[in-house]
Structure formats: structure tokens, C-alpha cells
Amino acid sequence: MSDSSTVQARRLPLSTALAFAATSLPISAVAIAISVYLPRHYASHLGIDLALVGAAFFIVRMIDIPVDGLLGWTMDKTRTRWGRYRLWTILGAPVLMAGIYFLFMPPEGVGRTYLIICLLVMYLGNSILALSHAAWAATLAPHYDDRSRLFGIITGIGVLGAASILAIPIINEARGASDAGNISTMGWFIFALTPIAVALVIWRTPEKIAPEIPGHAFRLRDYGALITRPSFLRILLADLCLSLGPGWMSALYLFFFTDSRGFTTGQASILLAIYILAGFAGAPLMGRLATKISKHRAVMVATTVYSLVLISLMAIPQGNMLIGAIPMFMAGFMAAGFNVLTRAMTADVADEVRLEQGKERSGLLYAITVMTTKIAGAFSIGLTFWVLSKVGYLAADGATNTPEAIHNLELAYLIGPVVFVMLGGACMIGYKLGAERHAEIRAELDARDALYDEAPIIESVTGEAAIVTPPGDR
């Protein structure tokens, strides 16, 4: 069989990949609603102080961070007849739905305590779904290029979930409805979408629990060993920067485009929809670029172009949708590659760790990666809202801001994202775990896994216990 035929045989069927990607629909919908619309809703429409809203998001994210590590470790230890990550996907759905209901349909007069409690529940459910989905993806597509392809499809499908959220304020504005009703509509949409998406994944996606070599128990100090692995440390630092940059931008997006660029909320949502929908094309194409030049080089390309485009946003004339659409499309196209590539690279590290330790650590590695994303999320809302409150910007409905306050808003919106995204790209300089090295790792893993698969057959034929000797130990 030729190499190309072998690659095709190993590829995950497109129908399976599309079904599996369904979980990214509610996850992406939550991400957009939480980062762009919800903080502004609590600050503007419910009247909670900007700094208090930022503090609530910061506190919850910091509480949520150690939970991810525990979840990842527990997922990797789970072995049931339903699978490992399938069970956690089922468990995560109702928790997320409960958090969404209370967070997006708040009663009048709520304060910071209510916001913190509801955020904790929502983030717990979201973490369970996101971690189990990412770790399951790593086992579903074990080979380098197919992994880039799968994560590209996941991100592309996630764009549809995000775009659906963006359509809500656009439709409501066209109907003449007020902005205040957008959040409850988003909440009901995510509440209904979550069980449908999870059911599709559970029904259509296979799961195989990788064999493990006995004898290596994970200890607390092994966290440090994982984090300080050169390849993984670069990924963590890059992921932190590539989450903090766009997250910073998302937190201030509506403020910037309405008060600085002169767009309505509906028009700003259309531009953001263009940004998100550009990722539908950008995610798979960035994944394809990674197969040509390696993932780490594709990250450097994406971050450089993204930063240059972001700087051009100040040149958008007031309220000009046509001109505004151009840089937003280009930025969204590039940004789609950030998550696709770093998550696929994390899966490569998981293979390297399993080859060395004989244990599946995908869940734990993704939990650590998600920790960096949550740290970035905590600072992107907590810090930016605090800064705006200190430089004289007023977020309340009907407030009038001075030119100086608007100028400070513009500086906050542009400087932070550009600096952090460029730092994220710089983290990839000198990255070692490329396509060639991963091919060697995969070959050794496939050979060892084949021995474990053959052992029960040998025992049934000979009646004697089959002793598996990994290729490297012969």
C-alpha cells in the first residue's frame, strides 16, 4: 500500500468528524456570549459597577483554575464500559445548562454574589464539556496531519455556534427590540442547543481507551514535570498570550465599536459575525497550512498577520460597515488558527508523554492548557474593566464620555491585544516537536499498541499469559 493510501485509510471519516465537532457548538456559543455580551449586560443594563463585574469574573476564573487540573486527572483515570471521555461529556451537559439558565435569566436587583455563584456553576459545566471534548479528540485522530484536520473541523463547526449568538442582537435590532432582551434569548438558545449537540456526539462517535503500561502512578510533582517539558511550556506560554490578546479585545469590543467607531450594537454584531465566520474558512485552511510548514510555523504566520490587521482598525471611518468588514474578516481568518494549532500541538505532546510513561495524559495536559486560557480570561475582563473604570470611561446606559475617555478606550483596545499576540507567536521560535519527530513517536506507539491488542488473542490460542514487551525494551 502506498503512503498516500495508508494516510487515507487512517483518516477519520468526515461524517464522524462533523458529528464529533457538534460539542463545539454550545462551547463556542458560550464563549462569545460570556466574553462579549454578558459582562456589558451586567454592567450597563443591571447597573453593577464596571470594576465589580470585572472582579467577579476574575474571582471565578481563579477559583475555576485548580478545578480543571482535578477534572483532567480524574478523566484520565476513568475507565467504564461507556468509555472514558464519553461519560464526562454526558455529565457536563446538565451542569452547563443549569449555569446558563440562572446566569442569562437573572431576576431584578442581582449583585456580585449572584453573578459569582452562577458563573461558578456555568464554568464547571463548560470545563467538563470542553476538557472531555479536547482529550477525546486527541485519541480520535492519533496522527499528525489528521489531528490538524480534526481540530480545524471542530473550530469551523464552532464558528456556527458563535455566529448563531451574534445573529441574536442583529435580529432583535431589526425587530426594534431593546438590547436588554438579547441576553435571555442567548441563554435559551444555548440551553436548548447543549443537549442536542451532546446527544449527536454520544450517538455517532466511537471511543477507544488506549492501553496503559502498569507501574507509573501520577504524583503531584509530576505536574511540574509536565509543565516544564520544553515543548509543552512553549505551548502554554503561547496559549496564554493568544488567549489574553483576543480575550482582551472581546471584553472591550462593544464599547470600542459603539463609542469609538460609531456603530450600533447590531452593526457591531454584524462586524463581529464577519470576524467569527471568517474563522469558518480560516480554521481548516490554517490546519492545512500546518501540514505544509508545521504547526508552530503556522502559528507565527497567523500572529504576525493578525497583529498588523488589528492596528488598521483605527483607520475605519465612523460607522462605515463596508470598510470595517475588510479588516474584521482578515483578523478573524487568522485568529481561527490560534486555538486550532495550539490544541493540536498539545495532542502531539500527549503522544510523546504516553510513549515515555505508558499512561494517557491527554485530559491532564488539556486541563493545564485550559488553565492558561482561564487565567487569560480572568485578566482580560477583570483587568480591562478595572482600567476603564480608572481612566474615566462610563459604561452605564445613557452615559456621556469625554474625548479623553474615548481615547483611553482606544488605547486599551489595541495595545494589549497586539502586544500579547505577537508574544504568543514569538514563543514558537525554536519549537522542536514538529511533523518529523511526531511521526517517529506515532510509529513507536502504534507498534506498542498493536502488541497489547494481540495479547488477548495469543492467550486464547495458547492458553498461556502473553507478556507484552514494548519495542524499546527488547
Image (cartoon, rainbow, N blue to C red):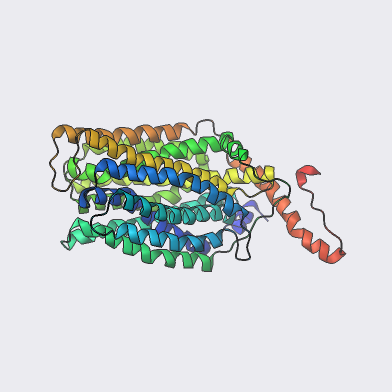
Determine which quarter of the picture holds residue 23: bottom left
Taking depth in this image into account, of 151 and 215 the one nearest to the observer is 215
Does 178 sit left or right of 17 as displayed? Answer: left
The picture places residue 342, in percent across and down from the top left corner, at 49, 43
Determine which quarter of the picture holds residue 168: bottom left
Taking depth in this image into account, of 40 and 160 the one nearest to the observer is 40
Q: Identify whether 196 is placed above or below 408.
A: below
Q: Identify whether 115 is placed above or below 246.
A: below
The picture places residue 429, in percent across and down from the top left corner, at 50, 31
Taking depth in this image into account, of 188 and 20 the one nearest to the observer is 188
Task: Kindly identify the residue that appears in the image at 53 percent across and 51 percent down.
Answer: 71
Taking depth in this image into account, of 82 and 68 the one nearest to the observer is 68
The N terminus, quarter of image:
bottom right
The picture places residue 368, in percent across and down from the top left corner, at 52, 43
The picture places residue 169, in percent across and down from the top left corner, at 24, 57
Does 150 sit left or right of 50 as displayed? Answer: right
Task: Kindly identify the residue that appears in the image at 57 percent across and 33 percent down.
Answer: 230
Does 468 sit left or right of 406 as displayed? Answer: right
Q: How many marks?
A: 0
The C terminus, quarter of image:
top right
User: Visible in this render: residue 276?
Assistant: no
Does 370 sit left or right of 460 as displayed? Answer: left
User: Visible in this render: residue 96?
Assistant: yes
